Image (cartoon, rainbow, N blue to C red):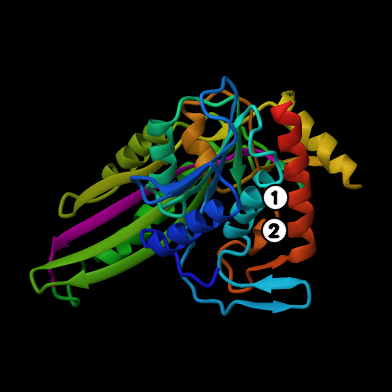
C-alpha cells in the first residue's frame, strides 16, 4: 500500500507483488504485457484451472498508511490491494504440487474505463473452471453481480455573442441537455424497481470556456446500467435526445466510452456453494449481494461462462473515500475463507 499505483502507474507495485509471490513459493511470477502482476501456483498442464482476478491499481488520493490498533488505513486497503493480498496469501496455503493450476492476477487499470489488465487476461488464458474477482464484499458477502457502465463526453459550441444580446448561452444549453437526460432516465426507469434494476445517471463534470470566437461547454455524463440495458443502444438513444433539443446555432459532438454490460450470476453454482460452506466453517453466516458499481467481472463475463463471484475483505462503502481503511481481523478471516474455498475447488 505504501507503493503508489494510481491507474496507469502500477509498475512498481506490480514488481513488488511479483517478487513477493516468488518468495512465498509461486511456481512462476511475472509482469504481463499489460503491466499486471501474475502468479502461477500448482501443477502446469492440468485440466483444472482457477483464476483469482484482483487489481493492483487505485484511484488518486494520498492517504497516509498507518495501523491504528487492528485497523489499516490507506489508499487501496479496501479497493483492492486488501483482496489481492488475501488472494496471494490464501493460495500460498495450498501444497505447491496441487493438481490444479491457480492463477493470481493483480490487474492494471481496473479503476480506469480501459480495464487493460483484465482484457489482457482474456487474451492470455483460456476460460478457467472457476473465477473469483477480488473486490471488497466483507467477510460474509459473496457478490453475484455488478451494474454496467456508460460514459459520454458532450461538447457544445456556438459563435461567441455579446452577453447583452438575448441568446441562449452554452452554459444554459448544457443545463438543458442535463435536464433532458434526467427526464429520459426517469422515463426508462418507470417500469423498474430496486436500486440494482434501475438506470443511474450522474453529471460527472461540466465546464464552459471561450476562445474569443466560440463559446464552448464540455460535459461528462455517467451512467450505471441495471440488467437489460445495452450501453451501445443507450448511448445512441441519448445522442438522439441531445441532437433533438439544441437550436441550429449550436453544434454538438458526443463521444461514448467505458461500455460495460451489466452482469448478474445465478447463485446456484458450486463456487457459491463453496463460499457458503467456508464462511459457515469460520462461524459466520454468508449472504449474496449485488453491487451498483462496476468491476473486472463485467469485462471477463463477456467471454467466460464458468462459475464466477467477487469476494474480498473490506467495506465497499469506503471505496474511493478519504476514510478508506481495512479491519485486519476481517482481512485474516477472509484469507481463511479463501483458503477453505480453494481447498474445495482443487478437490
Q: Nearer the viewer, residue 83 or 137?
A: 83
Say left or right for 106 vs 210: right
Which percent across, then down, holds residue 102? Answer: 59, 36
Q: Count the numbered circles shown.
A: 2
Residue 115 shows in this picture: no
Image quadrant for the C terminus? top right
Residue ID for mark 1: 137
Which percent across, then down, holds residue 215? Answer: 17, 67
Residue ID for mark 2: 314
Tell me which segment is drawn in magenta: 143-161
Determine the image quadrant of residue 268. top right
At mark 1, the secondary structure is loop
At mark 2, the secondary structure is loop
Mark 2 surroundings within 10 Å by alpha-carbon count, few (fewer than 14), some (14 through 19), many (20 or more): many
Which percent across, then down, holds residue 142? Answer: 72, 41
Say left or right for 253 vs 271: left
Q: At x 59% / y 42%, what residue is drawn?
A: 133
Q: Is the magenta region chiefly helix, strand or loop?
A: strand
Image quadrant for the N terminus? bottom right
Q: At x 12% / y 72%, what residue is drawn?
A: 211
- Seen in the picture, residue 130 relative to 323 is either above or below; the reply is above
- Residue 109 colored in magenta in the image: no
Amino acid at each position: 500500500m505504501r507503493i503508489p499505483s494510481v491507474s496507469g502507474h502500477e509498475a512498481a507495485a506490480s514488481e513488488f507483488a511479483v517478487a513477493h509471490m516468488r518468495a512465498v513459493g509461486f511456481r512462476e511470477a511475472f509482469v504481463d504485457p499489460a503491466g499486471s502482476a501474475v502468479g502461477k501456483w500448482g501443477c502446469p498442464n492440468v485440466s483444472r484451472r482457477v483464476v483469482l482476478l484482483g487489481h493492483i491499481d487505485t484511484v488518486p488520493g494520498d492517504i497516509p498508511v498507518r495501523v491504528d490498533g487492528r485497523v489499516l488505513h490507506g489508499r487501496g486497503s479496501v479497493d483492492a490491494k486488501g483482496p489481492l493480498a488475501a488472494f496471494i496469501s490464501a493460495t500460498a496455503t495450498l501444497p505447491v504440487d496441487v493438481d490444479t493450476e491457480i492463477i493470481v492476477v493483480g490487474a492494471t487499470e481496473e479503476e480506469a474505463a480501459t480495464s487493460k489488465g483484465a482484457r489482457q487476461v482474456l487474451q492470455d488464458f483460456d476460460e478457467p473452471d472457476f473465477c473469483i474477482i477480488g473486490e471488497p464484499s466483507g467477510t460474509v458477502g459473496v457478490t453475484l453481480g455488478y451494474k454496467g457502465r456508460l460514459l459520454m463526453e458532450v461538447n457544445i459550441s456556438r459563435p461567441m455573442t455579446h452577453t447583452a444580446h438575448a441568446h441562449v448561452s452554452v452554459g444554459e444549453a448544457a443545463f438543458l441537455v442535463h435536464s433532458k437526460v434526467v427526464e429520459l432516465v426517469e422515463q426508462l426507469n418507470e417500469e423498474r424497481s430496486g436500486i440494482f434494476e434501475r438506470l443511474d445517471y450522474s453529471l460527472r463534470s461540466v465546464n464552459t470556456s471561450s476562445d474569443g470566437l466560440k463559446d464552448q461547454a464540455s460535459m461528462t455524463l455517467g451512467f450505471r446500467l441495471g440488467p437489460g440495458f445495452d450501453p451501445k443502444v443507450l448511448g445512441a438513444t441519448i445522442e438522439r435526445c441531445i441532437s433533438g433539443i439544441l437550436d441550429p446555432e449550436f453544434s454538438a459532438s458526443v463521444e461514448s466510452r467505458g461500455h460495460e454490460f451489466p452482469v448478474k450470476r445465478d447463485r446456484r453454482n458450486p463456487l457459491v456453494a463453496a463460499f457458503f460452506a467456508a464462511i459457515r466453517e469460520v462461524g459466520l453466516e454468508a449472504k449474496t449481494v449485488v453491487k451498483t458499481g462496476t468491476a473486472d467481472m463485467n469485462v471477463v463475463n463477456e467471454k467466460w461462462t464458468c462459475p464466477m463471484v467477487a469476494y474480498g475483505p473490506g467495506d465497499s462503502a469506503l471505496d474511493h473515500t478519504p476514510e478508506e481503511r481495512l479491519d485486519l481481523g476481517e482481512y485474516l478471516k477472509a484469507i481463511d475463507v479463501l483458503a477453505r474455498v480453494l481447498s474445495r475447488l482443487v478437490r
